[in-house]
Amino acid sequence: MDSLITAAARALAAGDPLGALKRVALRDDPPALALRGIAMAQLGEYARARELLRSAARAFGPKEAVVRARCIVAEAEIALASRDLSFPAKTLDAARAALEQHGDRLNAAHARYLEIRRLLLIGRLDETELKLADLDPGLFPPALRTVHELVLAGVAMRRLRAGEARGALTRAGQAARQSRIPALTAEVESASRILNTPVARLISKKPKTRLVLLKDVEALLASNTLVTDACRYAVRAANTIVSLATRPVLFALVRALSEAWPEDVPRDLLLARAFGAKFTDESHRVRLRVEIARLRRVIRPLAEINATKRGFALIPRRGRKVAVLARPIEEGHAGVLALLADGESWSSSALALALGAGQRTVQRALDSLGSEGKVQSFGRARARRWITTPVPGFATVLLLPAPLPGG
């Protein structure tokens, strides 16, 4: 490898894309194309970066399996950064295997972390933790150790473990400073801000409503309080969790009962909350009794529901208090907005995958948000991407789970 290519590669490893481009910008040989592609990716020019990397991969000969695999890994990283979650997992896995076979341990590990970060992004936490357990960050340079700790912090945040997240981010910050890569340091600082940013609203009798941090949510869920979790559509107390993510009517009923606790809720109000009924007749009242009976059976380990003269009341077991954990800002398409709030451009297919929803459902949500001026798109057909500016003052860690079906 000539001296200019070596110097450009060192510049990229140090997070200096402009320094790399100064050395190879006018060259069109395969190694230079690959380095130019990585440099353009570091500068945020993802489309051009992918073109350059694909050209480099085609130009390398069949005997140059390692450098071709590196190009594929770099393209996979660009896909992840640009929220293109459709990049073939098998292609990345084959590139990783080729790198391992030829002794390129560090780039093979980088490929594994790309796969892990994708799993984290789409909310598959169990798989993320399993794959992390197979990696020893102590064997890697500071940049990869930073990535490892950032993934650990992301899992801990989504598991609502503020202490673990803070510890991982502290270690990530130390590794990022050792790497001397400004972009990594900035990423750690951005993740750390989540711990000091409201992630939810707590609705209870005293005080009525207040914004809470991740550590407050962790403490609430560890307490003896009966929590109706409107971020994850569940009712929970201590170690008992009743998920209602696939039963939107039951969740609407239990949330209305929880918000009114210890008072009862009139039947007309329950009908409006659960069914959107503007007027009621006997069929509505029958349906309400049926759904209340179903809700009683589902939440029996945690609470009872008593009928009153004007409606129904929630009676938690063991003298528990009741609270509702809600999104900081609630609207019909909060899940879509939460993902777009990371500042990256997303395709509708990637949003659908991350939310666990149908692509047509997500497209309708985007069209609705677009008509309200809350999101905007660029490109056409498969190249169409959606963006928005982050909602100031609120973290999105609790907004990432999929919305209720049909939301």
Image: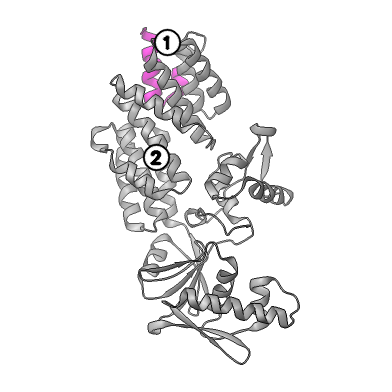
290 versus 111 height, above or below: below
Magenta stretch bounds: 1-20
Displayed quadrant of residue 351: top right
- Precedes in sequence: disc 2 or disc 1: 1
Q: Mark 1 falls on what kind of element?
A: loop
Main secondary structure type of the part rendered in magenta? helix
Q: What amino acid is at disc 2?
A: Ile
Residue 311 appears anywhere in the view = yes
Left or right, 102 with reference to 86: left
Q: Which image quadrant: the N terminus?
A: top left
294 versus 46 height, above or below: below
Residue at 49% x, 77% y: name it: 297
What separation in Å lies between label 2 and label 1 (alpha carbons)?
A: 29 Å
Q: Name the residue under label 2.
A: 116
Left or right, 1 with reference to 365: left
Residue 391 appears anywhere in the view = no
Residue at 74% x, 49% y: name it: 371
Residue 302 image point, x, y percent: 42, 77
Q: What amino acid is at disc 1?
A: Pro
Q: Which mark is residue 308?
A: none
Residue at 55% x, 79% y: name it: 293
Residue 306 image point, x, y percent: 53, 87
* Residue 138 forms part of the magenta stretch: no
Q: Which image quadrant: the C terminus?
A: bottom right
Residue depth check, mark 2 versus mark 1: number of the one nearer the observer: 1
Q: Mark 2 falls on what kind of element?
A: helix
Front residue of 101 and 182: 101
Q: Mark 1 points at which residue?
A: 62
Classed neighbour count for the residue bearing mark 1: other residues with Cα under 10 Å, few (<14), some (14–19), many (≥20): few
Classed neighbour count for the residue bearing mark 2: other residues with Cα under 10 Å, few (<14), some (14–19), many (≥20): many
